[in-house]
Image (tube, rainbow, N blue to C red):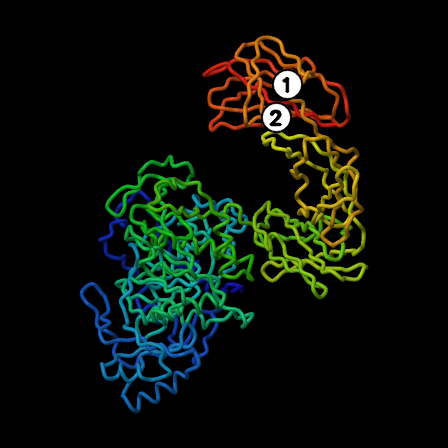
Amino acid sequence: MRRFVALTLLALLIGLPVGAPVSAAEPSSSDPSASPSSDPSADPSATSSSTPATAQPSGIPTVDPSIVPAPAVSAQPATDAAGRPDPSGRFLVMLKSNANVATVLDRHATRDKIKADRTFAKAMRGFTSKLTGTQRRALQADPNVLAVVPDEVVQLTAQTVPTGVSRIGTKLSPIAAIDGIDTRVDADVAIVDTGIAYHPDLNVAGGYNCSTSDTTAWRDVEGHGTHVAGTVAALDNNFGVVGVAPGARVWAVKILNDSGYGLLSWYICGLDWVLAQRDPNDSSRPLFEAVNMSVTKDGSDDNNCGATNADPLHAAICRVVAGGITVVAAAANDSSYASLRVPASYNEVITVSALADTDGLRGGLGGNACYSWGGYDKDDTFADFSNFGGDIDLIAPGKCILSTRPGNTYGISSGTSMAAPAVTGAVALYKSSRPNATPAEVKEALQYLGTLDWKWSTDPDSTHEHLLDVSKLGPLGTFNVGVGSSNVTGEAGGTMNVPITLTRSSTFFERVKFTVTNLPAGWTAPLSSPSLIGWTSNSTLMHVNIPLGTPLGRYTLQVVGTNQGRSDSVNVPITIVSDNPTANPPAAFLTYGVKLTTAVPIRISWPAATDPSSTIGAYQLQTSVNGGAYGNTVALDGATTTWLQPVAVNGTTYRYQVRAQDTAGNWSPWVQALATIRVSAVDDRSSSVVYSGSWTRTLYTYAWNGTITRSAHVGARATLTFSGRGIAIVAPRTPTRGSIDVYLDGALIKTISLKTSPALTRQVIITRGWTTVGTHTIALRVHGGSPSSLVEFDTFLVEK
């Protein structure tokens, strides 16, 4: 994972001849039908002569032979004219996790004459073999065999071509440090592909070949793997191209033959080797930070790591990811859903779609200068060939990408195969300074850093993936956990909300997960946000629940924040006390929008109670009638501070009291209203009401006392001077009534329409109140209205 580059290998790379870069405008290498460039240095015999079959380049960890796939014991499959290997009769045998591969093979070799081409011990437990129908049935009947799966042809997702790093902000990343000086990113990346050719612009560390019986022949003839490697990690050396993670060590895992085809079993072979390699400085860790898979086949995700649909590739990739290695997969180039392809559809990988970028700049101003896949794509749009859908995790430039090619040359290609290595390079960048990050944490971080600064309206589906952006990716930052209050006091039975703070350094945006320790028995302390991610995500609330019966005293909880193997904590002292809440006196007022019967509802309200150490959990309200004992208790929750209650309109006096209970169960003393309340009616026939203008008195069964007074004369008035703490007007409302103006102490306070449907009788249409008794004058004036000016007046209610 993290080690120094061997000087002998470095000298070898620097000593190779340098091919002149070609312009991105040159069409020759972007023709999908063009044959692969010939690479003299990639000839198998040349590779073997420079590196003996039994040795690996300096600095490459040796591999335990017991866990390396066995060389083939049968002839390699024949290939057709296009170079596709023939999978006929070849099968992958998936064994159960507790099965012994050698034991199963020995039993079936003796009884059924079955021979293994390759055995697997890491990515999956099993082997490959060419089987007859009888042999296949024998294996399927073996209780140690999980499944017998046909081998399949896999192939490249696109023609080869390079990537420009500026569009994803690599030149701005302090970790990439692109400045023309060959300072190499300390990471190891497996390129699962056609191999890698030695190239002066690449730090090729070694490899493994699964496409033939010669495991050392991992050189690249087809060119796809070399192109992918350049996008990931081409050197920052002032010539050629530069990769997203300049100088990272690239390893060739050759699972495709020189025509770009392979078998599923070769794929499993490569993953098995990848997972078997360990960090030379720490054998508990894998060698590789990332695996790039710009390879695809038909299939789907069973959401069960291949156990449900007997998918050995899925099972292997799940093992690789569980081993701590981040896997990046191309979405494929069918202009269809990525869910129809594997490994693109697997949830465990980072799946990448392709962006058409023509100028390496934001803004979509580069036009449509890039031609590939039979047409032009406009700058900053979703590439027309790229797969899409909910399985896509990121989008990266993938059209007309310039990168390394065999023969010390450079070329241009398009496809999601070219977009995926940009993300793989970003993974290498991220892991070089964050070695403890899990694959899930890597995916989350890159998605968070991504941006929607592209023409996402061109995305064929409604789930718009973020564009890869490493411009803000700096060294791993630091964090500190704190508490927002140094004096937290509460009561048994109560809940305390304690602010927990997170201080971040300038380059730290990753998720911090919180746990609470030192909780006494029976206590709980859930957090409103148990984890925080983002530059400005810096606080959460801890809800400390104290059970009843907890002894008084001081307790100390601890909140621990963790991120990628690091932690910071803060002690939270909590003092348990016993105190009572303080309630406030209620007051009662007439309220409008209600109906007068023999009684009228009034509104009783009070300011919220307070408590020095707990929240208010409940209230109780009681009533005294005509000076009698308090009773008629009403129980209310801690959020309710108002209540409607009917009072008789006959001079009966009422008085109210309230008390509060905190969440610890403590009650405040009862607090009485400052005054009694008495409501009386002043009927429309009362001599206290003075009329001016034209009014008519009418018997009306549904009115208070059976009478109402009406007028259609605009300007006619009904006036009452009274002494009290409140006043209300009662009137009927019908579909044919007009409006009245209401004056209080000579000032117009409101114009009220009496028109409504359906008709309503004895309606309280307006109220006014004061804290003390006083003398006031209220007047009604006919305002007019539609469909008529007619208004009716029933009675006044006076509160004293």
Q: How crowded is mark 1: few (under 14 residues within 10 Å), some or many (20 or more)?
A: some
Q: Residue furthest bottom?
A: 110
Query: Mark 2 near mark 1, Cβ–Cβ under 8 Å?
Result: yes
User: Residue 705 bears which disc, if any?
Assistant: 2
Q: How many dots with numbers?
A: 2
User: Residue 685 bears which disc, if any?
Assistant: 1
- Image x and y of residue 775, in percent: 75, 19
Front-lying residue, 615 or 631: 631
Figure check: 721 above or below 179? above
Disc 2 to disc 1, how far (Cα)? 10 Å
Q: Is mark 1 on a helix, strand or loop?
A: loop
Tell me the kind of residue under disc 1. Answer: Arg
**Left or right, 455 with reference to 740:** left
- Image x and y of residue 206, in percent: 42, 67
**Left or right, 729 with reference to 316:** right
Figure check: 790 above or below 82? above
**Left or right, 790 with reference to 606:** left
Q: What element carries label 2?
A: helix
Front-lying residue, 395 or 651: 651
The residue positioned 35% from the left and 85% from the top of the image is 105
**Left or right, 439 with reference to 497:** left
Q: Earlier in the sequence, mark 2 or mark 1?
A: 1
User: Residue 212 bears which disc, if any?
Assistant: none
Q: In which quarter of the image is residue 702?
A: top right
Front-lying residue, 136 or 791: 791
Tell me the kind of residue under disc 2. Answer: Asn
Report if residue 49 is visible in the image. no
The residue positioned 38% from the left and 37% from the top of the image is 364
- Image x and y of residue 137, in percent: 26, 82
